[in-house]
Image (tube, rainbow, N blue to C red):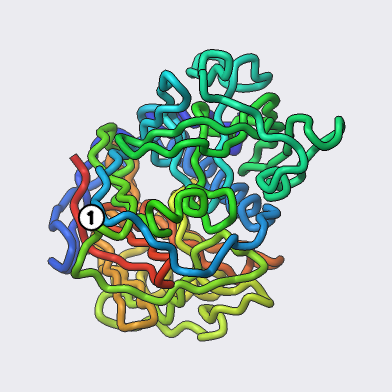
Amino acid sequence: MSLLALPLLAFLSIFLTPTTAVSSSTLQLARSHSVTPNAGAPLSAWAASVAAQSAADTARIVSMLTSGAGPLTTRAKPKPKNRANPPVPIAPGRQILSIPNYIARAGLGTPAQTLLVAIDPSNDAAWVPCSACAGCAASSPSFSPMQSSTYRTVPCGSPQCAQVPSPSCPAGVGSSCGFNLTYAASTFQAVLGQDSLALENNVVVSYTFGCLRVVSGNSVPPQGLIGFGRGPLSFLSQTKDTYGSVFSYCLPNYRSSNFSGTLKLGPIGQPKRIKTTPLLYNPHRPSLYYINMIGIRVGSKVVQVPQSALAFNPVTGSGTIIDAGTMFTRLAAPVYAAVRDAFRGRVRTPVAPPLGGFDTCYNVTVSVPTVTFMFAGAVAVTLPEENVMIHSSSGGVACLAMAAGPSDGVNAALNVLASMQQQNQRVLFDVANGRVGFSRELCTA
């Protein structure tokens, strides 16, 4: 079996075993531990599993940067209802559904049919597997439109049909609106529909989503997805009058199987003391959350990185995005090389051979320096050790959990701050006021 074909379940069995972290060189936002890895531990399966996840990350980034999302529906500030909304529990999907996304319980239809849907801030349209879907996971629950008294299809010629990527209306105006979409390494065909959607006790009437009919590939979350991007069919846009184009999340550690994280909807109940950086807009990739990363520190020293490798430029595609569906942070090649070299220089221990796509690994006890991302507006996010290093289940090897992006092409200049580096942080997306915020919050249980 090739490295890229390794099943995700193998990835989970290797990484979900609790391990003790290596010692940290700082107390800032980190816990200090010490371990002597077992240098003789078998690593081939671990390396293969990480390579598989790295390949999945690459496919996801390519698909979300080439999706044909439409323009934003409005730039006017909405008027949300003046009330706090119940937080939505979220959990890592790894142990529960064997997927890299974070998930929430959703009730769809009347009466509600429960699905564990992926929460994805880099996608717009929502979609769920529907009964008789060809290629959907047979062992997973699906949505039955026939069992819902409030379901209806969205016709061709409607505004919503014009907003989906690659709409298909072979029978003309008035027939059901179909569309095609690529997600990571998968493609699918869906019919556009509307029904009641509930996240915890947050109910949205007539939510527009795709009803999956044909799926090719195994990258599609088995029970569906809700997009929290900035496009016209995202949750954010469809509920802007209720939640004011504001949401935040806290992601638990990926090893957890508990719904201890939370998704908070609307401006009320968000952290009052939170540092924010301006949210940027790329007209060529309007759904994504760009922010201006101006530097990176390893330990106490700022890494010498060419500013052109960090600068936001919609024309060239360079800049930095926040994404919760990619697991490992990807940095533009010159940025990663500088961070890696600075990290190795602080550790001052010979590296082990590269494993699973990571090139900075250690099979002895090391002191791990902090890594700090610096953003415009004097915002600095210092990562704790568990957000910096990934460990084999045996404890035999620990690697820097970041990688370089492609060396050429349209995505070569993009930096993607991924979910592992966001764990136990409250990340605020305030589109109405054009800002993204970060606040340390322990939500792993």
Percent x, y of residue 175: 78, 30
| Nearer-the-camera pick, 73 or 307 | 73
The disc labelled 1 sits on which kind of residue?
Thr
**Residue found 46% across the figure and 77% down from its top:** 292
**Residue found 36% across the figure and 63% down from its top:** 350
**Residue found 53% across the figure and 44% down from its top:** 51
Percent x, y of residue 289: 49, 64
Q: Is residue 158 above or below residue 190?
A: below
For residue 165, side relative to residue 102 (left or right): right
Q: Quadrant of residue 293?
A: bottom left
Percent x, y of residue 91: 32, 37
Task: Using a 10 Å C-alpha cutoff, classify the residue at mark 1 as few (fewer than 14 neighbours), some (14 to 19) or many (20 or more).
Answer: some
Q: Is residue 73 above or below residue 218?
A: below
| Nearer-the-camera pick, 76 or 334 | 76
Percent x, y of residue 159: 69, 48
Q: Is residue 354 visible?
A: no
Q: Quadrant of the C terminus?
A: top left
The residue singled out by tag 1 in the image is 365
Secondary structure category for the residue under label 1 = loop
For residue 444, side relative to residue 156 (left or right): left
Q: Quadrant of residue 266?
A: bottom left
